[in-house]
Amino acid sequence: MHEARFQSFEDRTDRAASGVRLDALRAELRNRGLGGFIVPHSDRYQNEYLPPSEERLAWITGFSGSAGLAVVLADQAVLFVDGRYILQAREQVEGALFRIEPIAETSPDVWIEQNLAAGITLGFDPWLHTLDGVERFARACAAAGGTLVAAEPNPIDVIWVDRPAPPLGAVALHDLCYAGERASEKLARIRSEIEKVKADALVVSDPQSVCWTFNVRGCDVAHTPVALASAIVPKAGRPRIYIDGRKLSNDVRHQLEQLADVREPDAFVRDLSSLGEAQQTVRLDQASAADAIQRVVNAAGGKATRGADPVAIMKAVKNAVEIAGARAAHLRDGAAVTRFLAWLDREAPRGKLTEIDAVKALEDFRRYTGVLKDISFPTISAAGPNGAIVHYRVTEKSNRPIKVDELFLIDSGAQYEDGTTDITRTVIVGAPTPDMLDRFTRVLRGHIAIARAVFPDGISGAQLDPFAREALWTAGLDFDHGTGHGVGSYLSVHEGPARIAKLGGTALKRGMILSNEPGYYKSGAYGIRVENLVLVTEAEPVADAEKPLNAFETLTLAPIDLRLVSPTMLTVAENAWLNAYHSHVREMISPLVDAQTRAWLEHATSPIGKA
C-alpha cells in the first residue's frame, strides 16, 4: 500500500495558544477604539474550505471546522457552530476563553443584541461578510445601542505574525470533453440573464462560478479544484477576470485572453469604482458577494443590486456530458469503495486496524484507478463513539482502533476530472446490538424514502427533507444536519444553491446532483449515516398526471451493510428498493473487481426478504 497523499493526520489546532492570541486581539481592538470584533469562517470569496492563510477563526479559537463564527468582546467571547460541530468544538476550544453556542438555539445577531453594551463599537472585515450578514449585524448593534463599523485592515491579520502565504496553485484548462459547453456559450447565457435583471454588469464573486464560466480549474483550496479568482461580466463588451498571474501558464493565459481581459486582483477595486463612476447598475450575488464590493460601487456613484447568482443555477444543472461523466466517475469510484469494503470486512475483525489505516487504504484503492486527482474532502473515518461527531477528522492524537462489536462510519469522496463523488457507509464489525439494528434501519428507511421520491416540478429540497426523517421522528429521534447538499462537476463537493434541508428553498431541477444522507448519532456511543449521490431526472410517466414529475436516479454504487438491517421494519416497497439497488450494484461492479472482491460482493448484495 502507498502512503496517503491527500490527507494529513496532524492535529493542526493550537488550543494552548488561544489565550495569548485572544489577548493580542483585544489589545489591537483597544488601540483602534473598538469594543469587539466578529471573526467568521470565511475568506473574501465566502469559500467553505479555506486556504491556510485565511483560517482566522481556527487561529484565534482552535476550532478547525468548516463552518462557524466568533464574536470577541472586551470581557467575553463566544463561538457559534451548527449541530455538526458541537462535539468537535468542545474538544478543540478552550471553554474558559470561548463559550460555545449552538447556532440553532441562538443566532449571532440575537446574541449581539443581547450582549453588546450601549455605546460600544463592534468591528467587522467587510471583505469577509456578505451583504445580508452585515445588515443583520448592523440591526443587532443598533438595537443594543451600539454601532457596527468596518475595520480595515483586519485586526487579526495585523497580529498574525506567522501567517501562511496565500496559495499560488497552477490553473488548468477544463477540457470540453468534461465541461460539455464552451466558455463563450456560457458567457452568452450569462449576458442574457444580466439583461433580464436590468443590470449593466454582473460581479462573479464565487470562484466556483468563475472556474465553471471560463472552463478552468485550480488548486488553491484543499480538495476543491478551484482557483481563487473573481470576474466582472458586462452585458456588452469583454469580461474581466481577476487572478494572480503567477498561477497562469502561457497557454492558460492565452486561452483566457480569447474570452476576457486578465487582470491582477488589485485591479478589482479600481474597476468596481470605475463602474460606479459611470453610474452603472452592478448585480451582486447575495450568497457570496462581500459587503465591501457594494460599498465600493455605491461610494463611487453606482448602484449595487443583489439577488441570486445566475451562474450558480446554470452550474448546478449539469449538461449531458457532465451527467455522463458523473455516471462514469461513480462506477469507477464504486469499484474502489467496494474493494475497500471487502478488504475492511476481512481485516477489521482481527482487531488491528485503526481509523487512519482505513483512510489510507481507501485512498489507495481510489488511487489504483489511475485517474484520481484528489479526495473531495477530508475523509471522516470514525470508529465507535467518534462516529457521533458528525464531521469528525481523525488525527494521530485521536486515532482509535476499529473494535469488534462496534459501528464504523466512513464518509469519503473523490475528485476525478469527469466527476466528484461523496459516499458514506456505516458497517458493523462483529455483531450489532438491537439498538443499532433499529437505528440503522430507521436511517435506511429515510434514505430509501428520498431515493424513491416522485415529486412535481418546482418542489424544493425543504419540502422533501421530512421524507428522510419520518422513520426517526416516530421514535422521537432526529439528526442535526441537512439531508442533502448539491455536488459540483469536478468542483466543490458542497455546491449551492440546491439542497435537501429544512431551509433548502431552491427548486430541484433535472440535472442537479445532490447527496441523500440521513443519519443518527448517539453521543458517546456511535454514529450512523447512509449516503448516496442522486441525480434529478424525469419521473416515469404517470397516468393523468397534471404536472411534470421528477424523480431521483441513484448514482453511487456500493453495498449497504445488510447485517445492520432489520427486514421486519421495512415495508414491501422499501425491501424491494434495497434488493433492486443491490442487484444493480452487483451487476455494474462485479466486472470491475478481482475474484475475491467479487465473491464478497455476491454475498454482500444477496436479496433479503421480510420475515
Image (tube, rainbow, N blue to C red):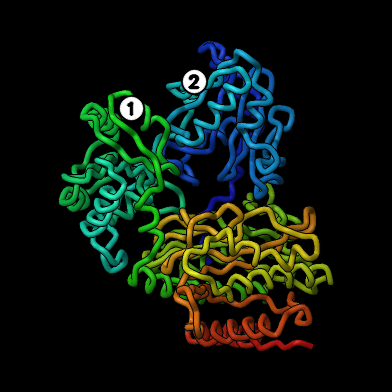
Q: Tell me where residue 353 sits by quadrant.
A: bottom right
Task: Pinpoint residue 218: horizontal percent, then vertical percent.
Answer: 35, 51
Drawn side of residue 264 relative to residue 510, left or right: left
Circle 1: element type: helix
Circle 2: element type: strand
Q: Which is nearer the eye, 50 or 202?
A: 202
Q: Residue at x 56, y 66 (%)?
A: 423
Task: Pinpoint residue 557: horizontal percent, then vertical percent.
Answer: 53, 76
Q: How many neighbours does mark 2 have within 10 angstroms: few (below 14), some (14-19), or many (20 or more)?
A: some
Q: Which is nearer the eye, 336 or 554?
A: 554
The circle drawn on residue 149 is: 2
Compared to residue 109, the image places residue 584 above or below, namely below
Rounded to the nearest whole Å, what is the CA distance between mark 1 and mark 2? 17 Å
The circle drawn on residue 605 is: none
Compared to residue 444, the image places residue 373 above or below, namely above
Q: Which amino acid does the dot numbered 2 rest on?
A: Val
Q: Residue at x 49, y 68 (%)?
A: 366
Mark nearer the viewer, 1 or 2: 1
Q: Tell me where residue 275 sits by quadrant.
A: top left
The circle drawn on residue 298 is: 1
**Which of the two discs, 1 and 2, labels the residue nearer the N terminus?**
2
> Quadrant location of the C terminus?
bottom right
Residue 73 visible in the snapshot: yes
Task: Pinpoint residue 594: horizontal percent, then vertical percent.
Answer: 52, 84
Task: Pinpoint residue 163: horizontal percent, then vertical percent.
Answer: 47, 30
Q: Which amino acid does the dot numbered 1 rest on?
A: Asn
Drawn side of residue 371 relative to residue 192, left or right: right
Q: How many neighbours does mark 1 have within 10 angstroms: few (below 14), some (14-19), or many (20 or more)?
A: many
